Image: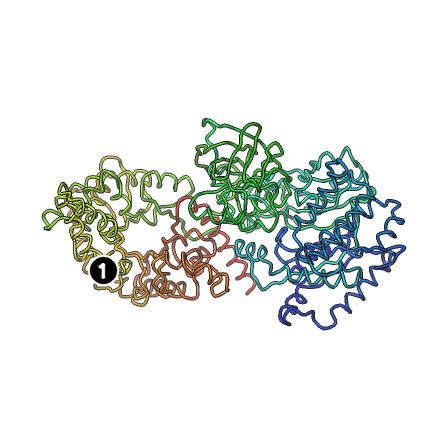
Amino acid sequence: MRDLLGGKGAGLAEMSRIGLPVPPGFTITTEACLEYYRRSRQFPAGLMDEVRQRMQLLEERTGKRFGDAAKPLLVSVRSGAKFSMPGMMDTVLNLGLNHTTVEGLARAAGDPRFAYDSYRRFMQMFGNVVLGIKHEQFEEMLLAAKRRRGVTQDTELSAGDLKVLTEEYRRLVRERAGQAFPDDPWQQLEMAIHAVFESWNNPRAITYRNFNKIPHDLGTAVNVQTMVFGNLGPTSGTGVAFTRNPATGEKAVYGEYLLNAQGEDVVAGIRTPKPIRELAGDLPQAYRQFMDVCALLEKHYRDVQDVEFTIEHGTLYLLQTRSGKRTGQAAVKIAVDMVREKLITKDEALLRAEPASLEQLLHPRLDPDATRRVIGKGLAASPGAASGVIVFDADEAVKLATERKVILARPETNPDDIHGLVAAQGVLTSRGGMTSHAAIVARGMGKPAVVGAESLGIDAEARQLTAGDVVVHQGDVITIDGSTGEVMLGEVPVIEPSLAGEIEELLRWADEVRTLGVRANADYPRDARKALEFGAEGIGLCRTEHMFMEAERLPIMQQMIMAATEGERRAALDRLLLFQKEDFKGIFREMRDRPVIIRLLDPPLHEFLPRLEDLLVEVTEMRLRGETDGLRDKEALLRRVQVLHEFNPMLGLRGCRLGILYPEINEMQVRAILLAAVEVKRDEGIDVIPEIMIPLVGHPNELRFVHQQLVTIAQQIVGESGVAVRYLFGTMIEIPRACLVADQIAEIAEFFSFGTNDLTQTIFGFSRDDAQAKFLHRYLEKGILKDDPFQVLDRAGVGKMMEMGAKLGKKIRSDLEVGICGEHGGDPSSVEFCHEIGLDYVSCSPFRVPIARLAAAQARLKEKTAVAKDI
């Protein structure tokens, strides 16, 4: 019932149902939250009447009364959406305390210090969450109280100290909020419920949902639960644990706890907690019970659980269970291990692994042979390595990340830092543990994190980090290793990852299930080699223009462009042919008998020449200085660039249009492709299948013209060689008109490849770079678009055109090979759509091939499930 009760409420209800020790409580549903927003932020009629009725039931079950001076009932008010959003929304603990009830709590517990510690915690949380006073202002008063007493730990403050502190908090609230701190428990409860509803749309929650693609229209439930206390002394405590290691997937309960503490102390990172195994020595009976509970929950849910617990005077209580967030590495290992343990099936394992999380396994790691200057060490909270300039403020991280890679360093992070975490390459904190906010969020994002590096002094105000005698200032470069916890000065070289172990096994299962082929975009032999390592079945796009950009070739390419006659152009192209042939031979050697799609030259010629603006400045300055040496050549180059200049080069002289005006360019490339194929087959026995792609076709006559010109050359080369080489001619479908007349194009083309980057631009009328820089982010913020269409395929528009084009093409040529070669080929949602419309393959960058393999398998499994339901 997660839709209605939220994840937290559903977990509490289920644990209660199976007899686990859960403090009594009730859940206000997500429907109430949505109605609250529909009613312009007003409670639904009768809501508080129902809350009062449920509170009466809690009073009956606990033998306590809400607001009673003798035996006060205290509650927690906690958010809980359908999808886990750790730390993004709000919680209030110890609600119901005031001048009177705090004394009743002290008498009932026989411990005034505990009562006033609970009261100051409540005032601090309520003041921050409900009244909007900055958390740091309360913390400053707490620190001042400790300084006055000459202590360092909260637990060293006496009941009298804490009582004075609550009065100081009361004055702070009046000054900052302009109102008295509310003493009426019912007013406190109503205001807290209101604040939790409001927290659904706070900036950090919206940022988190945008990053994790969680819908904004789900709302949050509110869980009102009887308080149990971990701050009642040395036989009480609180903690968070995972039933398996969320960073590595190791089968062992993994977590942390604090004695004499409440829950926020663990997750906020204010005190560094102890590893869960040490609970066996502190509270052995509670530890054994908790281990049994973890085993039961994992078996019941058949998945790793993230469990929050409190121990009150040695008695264990469970406050939450939810599916545990884990790194990509852990997700794969856990899924494979659970299949081996017969907890789940292979199909379930495939469906559980998040394709996008596999990217975490493909992060570079530090070169073990590289020199490192380690300046500190913390907890290895999220694997991977990252280097960047150190920044100490989330806003600054966002600002600098547009120009440089950054590492966000904070004493501890809090949910308000979420935008900085999104922008940074990795995060470093001096406080907090493996279940702190920084650790959980970084793991969810697949970013390296080192937390609890207590030997490092992180001073956010001074914008510097101190490690012994080393002072690191904002803007200096550091490296963090989230797999070892090391922090290093300067940039450390990295090495690329490879697939092995459990991920290899999971992807092998995926390959057994999927029907959609997976190829890679690769422009060089090294790319092709990496693609094969990651399981690519061929090359779906080899962009030949990248080959011309290399240092020894660019001058020849420029000579060809500057040539005044066809003869001069052909002379330059003959020199380029030798380079191109060797390039293709290198790729063919790597791919052997697998298909290789090679796109003929696509970009406009001016991209190989200096920028018009730069040349104008250079020529003008040379004229003003009276320089004659080289001026004539620069002026000739400027004239040529001006001739080639276009107002809209994306829709100008490029692709097949270039081949029609300058056929010798395409001819050279086809010669290089076929000569390379002939030579590797004749000399090395490699029977490659080159597929020659003619780009930017919008009219069948364009393709017909270029095809007739090139097929003659191909036949001539193969015929003269006496070597039987199979090759295909096809086109890239990237113009809307091509989709509409795909049946006519298929009369000539032997394969289609949808170029979804340009197809998206031309269908939306967006210039990708301009749109992403200027307004797309606002479209996403305002809900005009759900996703960036250049990252996630637009099914309703671009997808519909693709489906039409594929159907029209296959209607004419039943064996027509149809695929996709934009970066959408590595996006899980887009891969699923390609499977649904019957494409033959997707092609993406080598590092996204594993993602596409898993996503293709999931698409097939979802299809099978849907068919079974229909039957």
Q: Quadrant of residue 340?
A: top right
The percent coordinates of residue 56 (x first, y second) are: 83, 63
Q: Quadrant of residue 706?
A: bottom left
Colour mode of the rendering: rainbow
Residue at image coords 17%, 42%: 722
Residue at image coords 63%, 68%: 37
Mark 1 residue type: Leu
- For disc 1, the marked residue is 703
Q: Quadrant of residue 252?
A: top right
Residue nearest the observer in this picture, 540 or 284: 284
**Vertical arrangement, residue 855 with respect to residue 153, above or below:** below
The percent coordinates of residue 730 (x first, y second) are: 27, 55
Residue nearest the observer in this picture, 806 or 107: 107
| Number of numbered tags placed on the structure image | 1
Residue nearest the observer in this picture, 144 or 225: 144
**Vertical arrangement, residue 339 with respect to residue 471, above or below:** below
Residue nearest the observer in this picture, 173 or 422: 173
Residue at image coords 68%, 39%: 253
The answer to whether one can see residue 339 in this image is no
The percent coordinates of residue 199 (x first, y second) are: 64, 59
Classify mark 1: residues with Cα within 10 Å, few (<14), some (14-19) or many (20+): many
Residue 294 located left or right of residue 603: right
The percent coordinates of residue 862 (x first, y second) are: 52, 57
**Vertical arrangement, residue 616 with respect to residue 185, above or below:** above
The answer to whether one can see residue 71 in this image is yes
- Locate the N terminus by quadrant: bottom right
Residue 288 located left or right of residue 84: right
Q: Is disc 1 placed on a helix, strand or loop?
A: helix
- Locate the C terminus by quadrant: bottom right
